[in-house]
Image: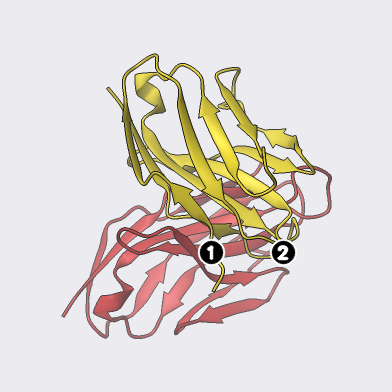
Chain colours: A red, B yellow
């Protein structure tokens, strides 16, 4: 079946520190991979995505590379800011088969807190 | 910028009561979803809806749950007889196409069953 495992939080960093949030997946088909972010009091927003192996998604200084060989999609940012404090969700969506298309499978979410 | 709107933001209900959670998806989207997140747990898929019918539902989506799109704009989730374990944040999402495209989420409705 499909599942996503991401590192347990919370993660606490100082401003300008390097961030990595690990995400690995299991999929029966050929998934697209996503990182969603949830800022306090807001809904889930797409941060970045990758649709095939070796694709790199990037947005707002965050990056993640679709690694089929390690079934991973780790989120990285070189220098975090206080405004990056949020919950980050790794997710996958399967492609290529009927009615399961579009359904997202989420990880548990990782709370990131950045201190000035 | 178009957005998915959910109402109410917070609903408190007594166990056994019916609740209806409302969502207005983005107007040109065709695929609609409900997810929920019990506090501290994963975001879980409940149901997907396309062309005025359910296209997929999870094992969570039992006979107590129903969805409809009565007027072409609102997309509702009804829980017929709420249980304590239904307390969660419920997210509505919509998508222009099924795969490889961004699903847009609403801000969520926090349902508390007492």
Q: Is A64 left, or right, of B86 in this rendering?
A: right
Note whether residue A103 is visible.
no
Rendering coords of residue B64 (x, y %): 55, 19
- Res B74 seen here: yes
Q: Residues within 10 Å of mark 2 (few under 14, many from 20)?
A: many
Decide which of A50, B12 is in the foreground and name it. B12
Residue indicated by mark 2: B100
Q: x, y (%) of residue B66?
A: 61, 27
The image quadrant that residue A2 belongs to is top right
Query: Furthest residue to the front?
Result: B71
Q: Earlier in the sequence, mark 2 or mark 1?
A: 1
Q: Quadrant of the N terminus of chain B?
A: bottom right
> To which quarter of the image does residue A31 belong?
bottom right
Q: What residue sits 57% from the left and 42% below the top? A: B34
Residue B3 tag number: 1
Q: Nearer the viewer, residue B103 or B11?
A: B11
Q: Is residue A19 left or right of residue B96?
A: left
Q: Residues within 10 Å of mark 1 (few under 14, many from 20)?
A: some
A54 vs B71, nearest the viewer = B71
**Residue at the image point whose x is 62% and y is 78% from the top:** A56
Find the distance from the CA under tag 2 to the CA under tag 1. Answer: 19 Å
Residue at the (32%, 74%) spot, across then down: A84
**Label of residue B98 in the image:** none
Chain name for mark 1: B
Q: Secondary structure at mark 2?
A: loop
Image coords of residue B106 (percent x, y): 49, 55
Disc 2 sits on a residue from what chain? B
**Left or right of residue A34: residue A82:** left
Q: Is A13 situated above or below B104?
A: below
In what element is the residue under mark 1? loop
Q: Of discs 2 and 1, which sits in the foreground?
A: 1
């Amino acid at each position: 079946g499909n599942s996503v495992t991401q590192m347990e939080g919370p993660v606490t960093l100082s401003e300008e520190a390097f961030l990595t949030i690990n995400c690995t997946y299991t999929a029966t088909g050929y998934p697209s991979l996503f990182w969603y972010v949830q800022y306090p009091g807001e809904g889930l927003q797409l941060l970045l995505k990758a649709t095939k192996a070796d694709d790199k998604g990037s947005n707002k200084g965050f990056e993640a590379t679709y690694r089929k060989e390690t079934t991973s999609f780790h989120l990285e940012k070189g220098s975090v800011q206080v405004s990056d404090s949020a919950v980050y969700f790794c997710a996958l969506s399967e492609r290529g088969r009927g009615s399961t298309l579009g359904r997202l499978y989420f990880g548990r979410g990782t709370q990131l807190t950045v201190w000035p | 910028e178009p957005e998915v709107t959910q109402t109410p933001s917070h609903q408190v209900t007594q166990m056994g009561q019916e609740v209806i959670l409302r969502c207005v998806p983005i107007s040109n989207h065709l695929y609609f979803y409900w997810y929920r997140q019990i506090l501290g747990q994963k975001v879980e898929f409940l149901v997907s809806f396309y062309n005025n019918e359910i296209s997929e539902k999870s094992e969570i989506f039992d006979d107590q749950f129903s969805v409809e799109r009565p007027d072409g704009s609102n997309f509702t989730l009804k829980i017929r007889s709420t249980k304590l374990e239904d307390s969660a944040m419920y997210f509505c999402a919509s998508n222009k196409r099924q795969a490889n495209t961004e699903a847009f989420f609403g801000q969520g409705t926090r349902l508390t069953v007492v």
